[in-house]
């Protein structure tokens, strides 16, 4: 996540400086609606991203500022010097945390902005190389990691999604697949075990293969465990080919290992790997020979890179629901579009409500609209009211995205015309809400 975090830190530093200036303007001209709206939106946006990136300290640092700004905006608190001082202190605290995060990143140059969302998969490979080195020492094994296809590029969002499954699979191969040096010598193998990672493109998919030359899967033990857990009858298991039996390892909590290790647990987690890959519109293949090793093949749909434009659209996929995403933050758009594409949607993004209304005038059809609530110039509530007033999208389902999830916020969104309200960057809930809307 280094590149994503780097972009976030750059944008956040600039946004906090802008919030400082607007807060001082708010002190000079109490109640200035433009200044108040700007500061609130900046704080709200940063907090929403903190939840996604897992930055609780920064999120908490801005809690008081958001609370004060919300009360000023709602009219329950007047603008007073003490309140402005409290907001400025919260912004200063946030700036210190951002500076600290920048200093603790991987090294010099990490804060250089990048406009290219496609990244070589080697950025993940490098971390896996370090992981294998660490595991070799911890497990007392000799393990070599061989890499192919490091220069192949993948959307940065998909790289983040695929990283954790790959790390778990590498741990699993090193811990349970590769034998100890004495075991390998007894089996007529070199002392050093090998894990091979390769990537290649095939049509509209990325194929990532992880292969080890270890002990392979014990089909008899898998059959026994499946029978013990009631996953199949003895007759059914006897009739199953080995390849089908092997896939029981993807069942939740399935394990043939009795001991828990500090490295990869007790073979658990492959069900989570499968689930995560399927969420990316992908699949996972498996082949194994006892005594010869195991191969996992991840097949992942690769949405095209999103290019900056008035409207940014993923390539067409027949049968995919078409979404319009309205979000003023470029960083949020970069996170959201590939996530939606990986979940089976065809997404078009615009940078604000007025740009969305320009598309409405063209009559461009969409199956659903996802819109931020807090936006400059024209917010999401105003957009929803305008859409519901008539036109080609009057009956199109709308999902509100907001970092504010209080009852009043939800009711305001629904009253404006939104069909559903989702907390910003709860990806699973957003996808679930969209599917509910489209099924209605």
Image: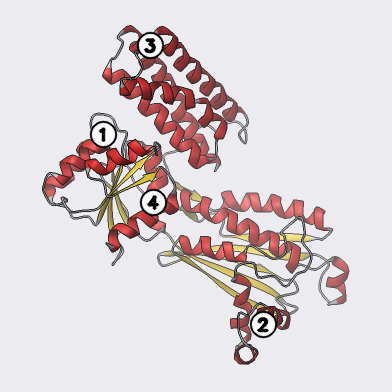
Q: Is residue 141 visible?
A: yes
For marks 4 and 2 on the same chain, the one whose residue lies earlier in the sequence: 2
For marks 3 and 2 on the same chain, the one whose residue lies earlier in the sequence: 3
- Dot 1: element: loop
| Tag 2–tag 1 contact (CB < 8 Å) | no
- Front residue of 186/324: it is 324
Res. 4 mark: none
Marks 2/1: CA–CA distance: 57 Å
Q: Which residue is mark 2?
A: 227
Res. 430 mark: 4
Say if 54 sits above or below 257 in the image. above
Q: Judge the density around disc 1: few (<14), some (14-19), many (≥20) Cα neighbours within 10 Å.
A: some
Instruction: Tell which tag, 4 or 2, sits nearer the viewer.
Output: 2
Q: Judge the density around disc 3: few (<14), some (14-19), many (≥20) Cα neighbours within 10 Å.
A: some
| Tag 1–tag 3 contact (CB < 8 Å) | no
Marks 1/4: CA–CA distance: 19 Å
Marks 3/2: CA–CA distance: 70 Å
- Front residue of 385/198: it is 385
Q: Which residue is mark 3?
A: 24
Q: Is residue 263 left or right of residue 296?
A: right
Q: Is residue 4 visible?
A: no
Tell me what residue is drawn at x 64 percent, y 62 percent. 169
For marks 1 and 4 on the same chain, the one whose residue lies earlier in the sequence: 1
For marks 1 and 3 on the same chain, the one whose residue lies earlier in the sequence: 3
- Dot 2: element: helix
Q: Judge the density around disc 2: few (<14), some (14-19), many (≥20) Cα neighbours within 10 Å.
A: some
Q: Which residue is mark 1?
A: 379
Q: Where residue 238 sits in the image (x, y, percent)?
A: 64, 91
| Tag 4–tag 2 contact (CB < 8 Å) | no
Tell me what residue is drawn at x 52 percent, y 37 percent. 5
Tell me what residue is drawn at x 31 percent, y 24 percent. 74
């Amino acid at each position: 996540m280094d590149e994503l975090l780097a972009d976030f830190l750059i944008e956040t530093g600039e946004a906090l400086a802008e919030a400082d200036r607007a807060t001082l303007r708010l002190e000079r001209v109490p109640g200035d609606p433009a200044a108040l709206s700007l500061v609130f939106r900046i704080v709200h946006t940063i907090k929403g991203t903190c939840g996604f990136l897992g930055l609780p300290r920064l999120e908490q640092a801005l809690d008081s500022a958001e609370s004060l700004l919300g009360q000023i905006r709602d009219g329950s608190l007047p603008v007073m010097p003490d309140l402005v001082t409290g907001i400025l202190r919260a912004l200063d605290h946030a700036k210190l945390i951002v500076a600290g995060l920048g200093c603790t990143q991987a090294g010099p140059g990490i804060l250089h902005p990048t406009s290219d969302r496609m990244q070589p998969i080697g950025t993940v490979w490098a971390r896996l190389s370090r992981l294998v080195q660490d595991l070799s020492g911890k497990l007392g094994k000799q393990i070599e990691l061989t890499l192919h296809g490091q220069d192949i590029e993948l959307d940065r969002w998909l790289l983040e999604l695929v990283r954790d499954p790959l790390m778990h699979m590498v741990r699993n191969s090193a811990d349970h697949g590769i034998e100890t040096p004495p075991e390998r010598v007894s089996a007529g193998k070199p002392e050093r075990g090998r894990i091979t990672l390769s990537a290649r493109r095939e049509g509209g998919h990325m194929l990532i293969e992880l292969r080890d030359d270890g002990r392979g899967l014990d089909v008899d033990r898998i059959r026994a465990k499946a029978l013990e857990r009631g996953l199949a009858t003895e007759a059914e298991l006897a009739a199953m080919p080995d390849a089908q039996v092997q896939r029981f390892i993807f069942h939740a909590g399935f394990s043939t290992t009795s001991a828990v290790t500090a490295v990869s647990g007790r073979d658990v987690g492959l069900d989570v790997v499968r689930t995560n890959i399927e969420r990316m519109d992908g699949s996972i293949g498996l082949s194994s020979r006892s005594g010869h090793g195991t191969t996992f093949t991840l097949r992942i749909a690769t949405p095209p890179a999103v290019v900056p434009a008035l409207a940014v659209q993923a390539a067409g996929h027949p049968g995919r629901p078409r979404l319009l995403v309205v979000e003023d933050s470029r960083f949020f758009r970069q996170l959201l579009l590939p996530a939606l594409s990986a979940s089976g949607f065809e997404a078009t993004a615009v940078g604000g409500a007025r740009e969305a209304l320009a598309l409405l005038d063209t009559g461009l059809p969409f199956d659903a609209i996802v819109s931020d609530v807090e936006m400059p110039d024209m917010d999401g509530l105003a957009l929803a009211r305008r859409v519901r007033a008539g036109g080609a999208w009057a009956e199109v389902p709308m999902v509100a995205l907001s970092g504010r999830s209080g009852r009043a916020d939800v009711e305001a969104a629904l009253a404006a015309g939104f069909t559903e309200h989702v907390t910003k960057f709860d990806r699973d809930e957003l996808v679930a809400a969209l599917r509910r809307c489209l099924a209605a």
